[in-house]
Image (tube, grey):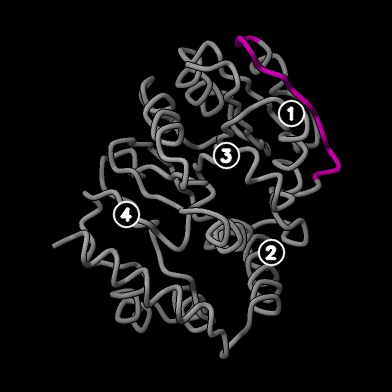
């Protein structure tokens, strides 16, 4: 594996076991540069992180946010060709990094790759979604029975997740990007403190290359759905949604309509 592959992980009061599970998944990738930005109030995870090879640990208790922290990490690992954005609540088999990196190296029109994401019990997480409208996000949070009907297309429940396809929206829990593409876009939009920054980045990435779902690579994600349990995180989610729709359009977003229509057609054709 090339030495110019990097990864960034943003921590916030994660458990030691969670961090160890992830870093154990990465330790076989001996040439991978790993940059950890710890936004926790105190640096209790420092010793755990520095126990691993090729890990740079930075404590930022001022907590600039998810996107800003990953942007900072990319500036630190400035010589990589491929960069992985990885949530601390994920883990995977040792070959996962190599599978995704090889695909990016062999497909020059691709600027972002996401794997198949599963729950710890092996069930599929349907994270390949269309670009959301305000009604998608509102009903999923407050009117779940209505959302279930809308999710048929929004979550593409007709897609079996067994084909390599181009998708409109990549989940920020685990994504691999060409570092050059990430820098060209100035990374994540830092107006988003937490939530929606991956959807925003997906739209901007799709303008310069393909965003691909790769089922051969599998990642386990614990997926706590924090905004469903915490009023503080719910507020952060709502605030980010408002910022997102202010940026891209609320009811009238012709680009969203076009992108989603094209995505449905391509994915249905690939699934035939």
Give the structural element (helix, strand or loop) at label 1: loop
Precedes in sequence: disc 2 or disc 1: 1
**What residue lies at 34% left-to-right and 52% top-to-bottom?**
125
Q: Residue most toward the left?
A: 272
Residue range in magenta is: 51-63
Q: Position of residue 70 (x, y in %)?
A: 70, 41
The residue wearing badge 2 is: 236
Q: In this view, does 153 lie to the left or right of 107?
A: left
Q: Is residue 114 magenta?
A: no
Label 4 neighbour load within 10 Å: few <14, some 14-19, many 20+: many
Judging by the rendered image, the residue that carries numbered circle 3 is 178
Residue 165 bears which disc, if any?
4
Position of 239 with respect to 82 (left or right) is right
Q: Does the magenta run of residues contain 55?
A: yes
Of the image marks 4 and 2, the number of the one nearer the N terminus: 4
Which x, y percent locates residue 38? 73, 33
At a point 68% along the width and 26% down the height, the residue shown is 35
Task: Find residue 78 and name its label.
Answer: 1
Mark closer to the chain start, 3 or 2: 3
């Amino acid at each position: 594996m090339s030495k110019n592959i990097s990864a960034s992980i943003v921590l916030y009061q994660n458990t030691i076991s969670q961090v160890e599970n992830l870093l154990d998944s990465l330790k076989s990738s001996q040439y991978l540069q790993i940059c950890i930005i710890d936004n926790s109030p105190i640096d209790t995870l420092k010793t755990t992180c520095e126990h691993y090879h090729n890990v740079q640990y930075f404590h930022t208790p001022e907590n600039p946010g998810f996107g800003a922290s990953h942007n900072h990490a990319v500036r630190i690992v400035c010589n990589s060709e491929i960069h992985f954005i990885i949530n601390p609540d994920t883990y995977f088999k040792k070959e996962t990094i190599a599978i995704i990196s090889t695909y990016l190296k062999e497909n020059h029109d691709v600027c972002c790759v996401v794997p198949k994401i599963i729950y710890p019990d092996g069930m599929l997480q349907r994270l390949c979604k269309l670009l959301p409208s305000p009604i998608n996000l509102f009903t999923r949070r407050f009117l779940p029975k209505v959302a279930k009907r809308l999710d048929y297309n929004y979550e593409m429940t007709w897609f079996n997740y067994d084909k390599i396809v181009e998708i409109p929206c990549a989940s920020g829990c685990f994504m691999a990007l060409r570092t050059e593409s990430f820098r060209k876009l100035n990374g994540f939009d830092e107006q988003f403190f937490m939530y929606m920054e991956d959807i925003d980045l997906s739209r901007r990435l799709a303008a310069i290359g393909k965003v691909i779902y790769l089922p051969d690579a599998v990642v386990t994600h614990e997926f706590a759905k924090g905004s469903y349990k915490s009023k503080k995180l719910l507020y952060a989610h709502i605030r980010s949604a408002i910022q997102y729709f202010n940026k891209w359009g609320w009811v009238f977003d012709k680009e969203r309509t076009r992108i989603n229509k094209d995505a449905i057609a391509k994915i249905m054709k690939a699934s035939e």
